[in-house]
Amino acid sequence: MRDVAIIGVGINRWGELWESPLRDIFVESALEAIADTKVDHLDSMYVGCMTSGLFIGQEHLASLLADYLGQNHLPSARIESACASGALAAKCGYFEVASGASDIVMVAGVEKMTDVGGDGATYALSTAADAEYEVYHGVTFPSLYAMMAVEHMHLYGTTSEDLAHVAVKNHKHGAKNPLAQFPFEISVDAVLNSIMVADPLHIYDCSPITDGAAAAILCPLEMASKFTDKPLVRVAGIGHATDTIALHQRKELSWLEGTARAAKQAYKQADIKPQDLHCAEVHDCFTIAEIMVIEALGLVEKGKGGSAAKEGTTALGGKIPVNTSGGLKSKGHPVGATGVAQLVEVTKQLRGECGERQVEGAKYGLTQNMGGTGGSAVVHILEAI
Amino acid sequence: MRDVAIIGVGINRWGELWESPLRDIFVESALEAIADTKVDHLDSMYVGCMTSGLFIGQEHLASLLADYLGQNHLPSARIESACASGALAAKCGYFEVASGASDIVMVAGVEKMTDVGGDGATYALSTAADAEYEVYHGVTFPSLYAMMAVEHMHLYGTTSEDLAHVAVKNHKHGAKNPLAQFPFEISVDAVLNSIMVADPLHIYDCSPITDGAAAAILCPLEMASKFTDKPLVRVAGIGHATDTIALHQRKELSWLEGTARAAKQAYKQADIKPQDLHCAEVHDCFTIAEIMVIEALGLVEKGKGGSAAKEGTTALGGKIPVNTSGGLKSKGHPVGATGVAQLVEVTKQLRGECGERQVEGAKYGLTQNMGGTGGSAVVHILEAI
């Protein structure tokens, strides 16, 4: 297998982009990624998108987007694994480059979520849960994560204030990210006094509905210096695992076994330990998710995730800064784009391009992207060379 | 890159499977593929499915199916490229094995199309066309292929009778396939007297709505004899190309440039010419499609596809038997499964397992799977070793 590098990244300003159709949002990020390199062509493309069928009535997305990028005839495939679609697209592109079949491969993610009215977005997102055993009975994602939070509170004494501190931290980071959907700070009181969505999750515990895209360009590490003058970023490890998509089938509601398994593979391939990491972008679709994820990644002990944000462990300047981009909470969560956007942020961190939110001397960074309540999980470890 | 073999295949009886949910249909085919080998585990899985979101309200499909196959935690991804989803899933699995990252990878396809009522299936399928420039204006797939047929008739003198002969041939083949949805013969008169769907396409020019799945297991060629006692089948070449998904953007409506490009890549990798092939499974979603496809594949000259079925060129016993399985027309067309089912048929042909529809001495076989009106196209060439 060939070593693979990320040589270019692109991302647009995320938000409620009423004036832009999905194809334009994608193209903006993809062109930025191309402009971030010196490549003169692409060999192939993978696009992560969760459910453009339900959001905008459009499947067959990868061919459409290749054409709109001015790359008609380019081999192009769409990858779907709910909110982990973006990172899985990156994994598929990684194999194509690693195999030797192609040299320059774009991996991207996109979602246009605001074009459906009424409860359309909530229904579209619910299709990441088990339709027959969960959704038919009224389950939505806030209620599923609320059940996970309740168990974590019961087992480990985690409090609503602990959850609020995750949102506060990520908004503090996001305030330093001009491309974030909500680039402003919030207070613990604001979270605790916001509308209750599904007890114990307030609306400020939940990531928003977002339109957005992100893109990255992969090539063999041995060719990377031909295509970029920036610091080289190697894909040091990838892990991927699934879990039951129905929450009631798990042994523990508040333990993310899929993430733990994906992380184990990625650490092994990268030959590093959790304590070797300098930054991490993780899937905080709800505040409780970040708490469970940092436990499954081994960044904190099992059961100790609740206090990490409050104590500053996961803040900029702390032991392991988590979600320097603002995370899903502040940056936004266009579901199929999130996994690639995490790779964009960590690549920029490893290149030293993050300005006010830069983690000084970052050499190893991790991304963790997951679908549903953790029914799919993908972990990438990137290394500055 | 490592050479890759297909060591096991599975397919269920296709049709209107009212009693079976998607997950059961998938598992039936997947278990048959496993039982066709001596493997004791899987390393990874790719599932092609076009639009389970619109058909059954279920995304996040690959994780769900890994679990229902008894493989909870297996890395598993869903691939979508409209009706080419199945073959693209196979391509993604091919790269994973070729790269050396994994040894035993299942590639599968599935679609459950009969659970939506009213015009639901027609709408779901229309999302393979351009939502903004085609579907909003009332286009459906029979009307798009009807326009392609009209141009082919205008340019080359192709007739409704020529189209009918494609359906008659494929039903004649399908009558020898006990797993086909419509395993019976029809006459030219029956086609020409059937209901007109979109002039010049009668309902017997159209493939049906089908529930079904198919699966295959890949491994490195060098390990294949450990896992099967059957004749070895090598993936000799793969080609993949896209085209505009909007028909009006093409230079010629009745020329499949995506398929022509994919075929060129596959022939080059396999180092063979079209005349070296012994059988082919192609994407006859409408009778006119088979006519255009055999031209783009170089099996007949451009403009000469119309008479191939009538003259027996593409029938069993002819120069190049096309769609010995019955094709999409007689075997059925569960859209995400079709590309993998084509690989199942060609694998069985190369192993000499096709009974009454066997092509004697078949050494090279081709599959061609496409999405929309040809906006994505994937060609595989398989070789008996």
Image (tube, coloured by chain):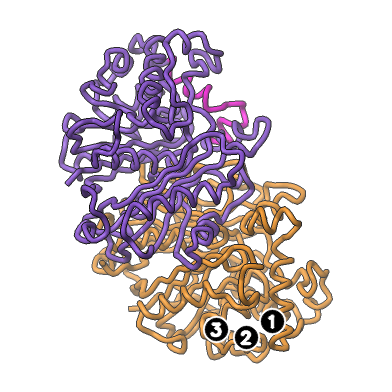
Chain colours: A purple, B orange
Q: Name the residue at 50% across, 24% down.
A: A144
Q: What residue lies at 47% left-to-right and 68% top-to-bottom?
A: B241
The residue sitting at 32% across, 17% down in the picture is A309
The secondary element bearing badge 1 is classed as helix
Q: Which residues are magenta?
A: A129-150
Q: Residues within 10 Å of mark 3 (few under 14, many from 20)?
A: many
Q: Which residue is tagged 3?
A: B321
Q: Disc 1 vs disc 2: which is toward the camera?
A: 1
In this rendering, would B15 be left or right of A159? right
Q: Is residue B161 magenta?
A: no
Can you identify the residue that label 2 sits on?
B305
Residue B372 picture location, percent across and down: 61, 63
Mark 3 vs mark 1: in front:
1
Q: Earlier in the sequence, mark 1 or mark 2?
A: 1
Q: Secondary structure at mark 3?
A: loop
| Distance of label 3 from label 2 (alpha carbons) | 14 Å
Q: Are marks 1 and 2 in contact (CB under 8 Å)?
A: yes
What type is the residue that disc 1 sits on?
Answer: His
Q: Chain of mark 1?
A: B
**Which of the marked residues, 3 or 1, is nearer the chain's N terminus?**
1
Disc 2 marks which amino acid? Answer: Gly
Which amino acid lies under the numbered mark 3 shown in the image of this protein? Answer: Pro
What residue is pinned by disc 1?
A: B152
